[in-house]
Amino acid sequence: MAFDSFPRLLQDLTGNHGLLRESLDGLILGGATAMNLAVVDGVDILAERAERRAIIVLSDGYDTTQTVSVDQAVDYARRLDVRVYTIGIFGVEGGDLRGRRSFDSFNPGEDALEAF
């Protein structure tokens, strides 16, 4: 599943690495970030499966659509016994990119990922 302005399923569940790679190679993202809704949609897909269920989220943690709150997504995953693992993708501070001094700042995206 990929998400930008809305989540979309790129490939049905499969163990075929070639199909997965092909789906990821064709990935084009843009727009907003509907991360929490993507987690809920992923939980829905996995909820009916009997085997161990887990979602891995790669994101900066900023859900810009706020269709679903992070608390709602976390609670939903817990209720349906789907584990959510997160990998935060964070860049350098903007000041560093421009050669200026920068200071540590509060990162709500990181906090959102830690909530899972």
Image: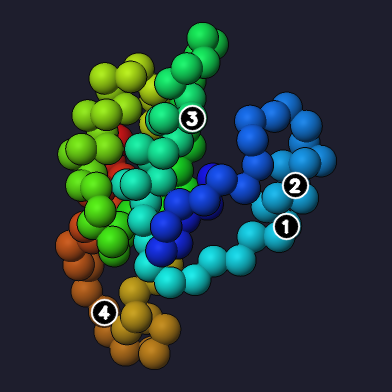
Q: Which colour scheme is used?
A: rainbow
Is residue 104 placed above or below 74 in the rendered structure?
Answer: below
What residue did someone put label 3 on?
A: 45
Can residue 87 be seen here? no
Q: Which of the two discs, 3 and 1, sits closer to the camera?
A: 3
User: Where does the image place residue 58, in percent across and percent down from the top left?
Assistant: 47, 48
Q: Which residue lies furthest to the right in this view?
A: 18
Q: Residue 25 carries which label?
A: 1
- Residue at the image point whose x is 64% and y is 60% from the top: 27
Say which amino acid is labelled 4: Ser
The first of marks 3 and 2 along the sequence is: 2
Q: Which residue lies at the image location 38% right of the left edge and 67% below the top edge? A: 32
Q: What residue type is labelled 1?
A: Asp
Instruction: State how far apart marks 2 and 1 are (Cα).
Output: 6 Å
Residue 98 vs 73, above or below: the answer is: below
Residue for badge 4: 102
- Where does residue 60 sit, x and y in percent of width and height? 38, 58
Helix or strand or loop: what does disc 3 sit on?
helix
Q: Residue 90 carries which label?
A: none
Q: What's the CA distance linking mark 1 and mark 4?
A: 35 Å
Do the residues bearing badges 2 and 1 touch, measured as CB atoms within 8 Å? yes
Q: Amino acid type of disc 2?
A: Arg
The residue that label 2 is drawn on is 21
Which of the 4 image quadrants contains residue 102? bottom left
Residue type highlighted by circle 3: Ile
Q: Position of residue 22 (x, y in %)?
A: 77, 50
Number of callouts: 4
Labels 3 & 2 near each other (Cβ < 8 A): no
Spatial CA span between label 3 and label 4: 42 Å
Q: In this view, does 115 lie above or below 62?
A: above
Of tags 3 and 2, the one toward the viewer is 3
Q: Where is residue 55 in the image (x, y as percent from the top left)?
A: 47, 32
